[in-house]
Image: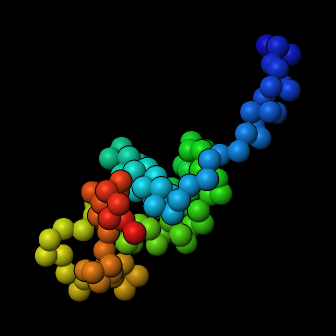
Amino acid sequence: MWHELDLEAMACEAFVPAPDRTPEEVEAIVVIVRLELCNRGMPCGAVALRERLREHERLRPLPSVRRISRILTLYGLTYGRTGWYDGDAIDGLPVSARVPPDKRKHFSMIGNGQNA
């Protein structure tokens, strides 16, 4: 069993560099993985997302927990929220989740060139 493994091939595969990602691509990956975890009822905070990205996505370098947290905040994906909606007020949100309406992002912007 284990003696049948091709260790040289495995070592080469482990060092294949992941493609460079633009900041927009990183944001899209974080948002999509967060929504996937949320829809499955799994933990979907910044720490859980980073662990999921480390284990399952070819994303290198891995964004920091702080960067992931900031992405989630910009997209309104914190505190059990599933995004920003028309008329959302920031009054009831914790200070760390308050984003002015002109700075908010929505996952429908991903891939439309509007995410800059």
Locate the C terminus by quadrant: bottom left
The residue located at (23%, 86%) in the rendering is: 91
Vertical order, 23 against 14 (above or below): below
On the image, the x and y values in percent for residue 115 come to 36, 65
In the image: residue 112, left or right of residue 56: left
On the image, the x and y values in percent for residue 9 come to 80, 25
On the image, the x and y values in percent for residue 7 come to 84, 25
In the image: residue 7, left or right of residue 107: right
Vertical order, 87 against 106 (above or below): below
Vertical order, 99 against 18 (above or below): below
The residue located at (47%, 55%) in the rendering is: 25
Q: Nearer the viewer, residue 9 or 64?
A: 9
Vertical order, 47 against 4 (above or below): below
In the image: residue 83, left or right of residue 58: left
Q: Nearer the viewer, residue 55 or 9?
A: 9
Q: Nearer the viewer, residue 53 or 113?
A: 113
The residue located at (35%, 60%) in the rendering is: 113
Locate the N terminus by quadrant: top right
On the image, the x and y values in percent for residue 109 come to 30, 60
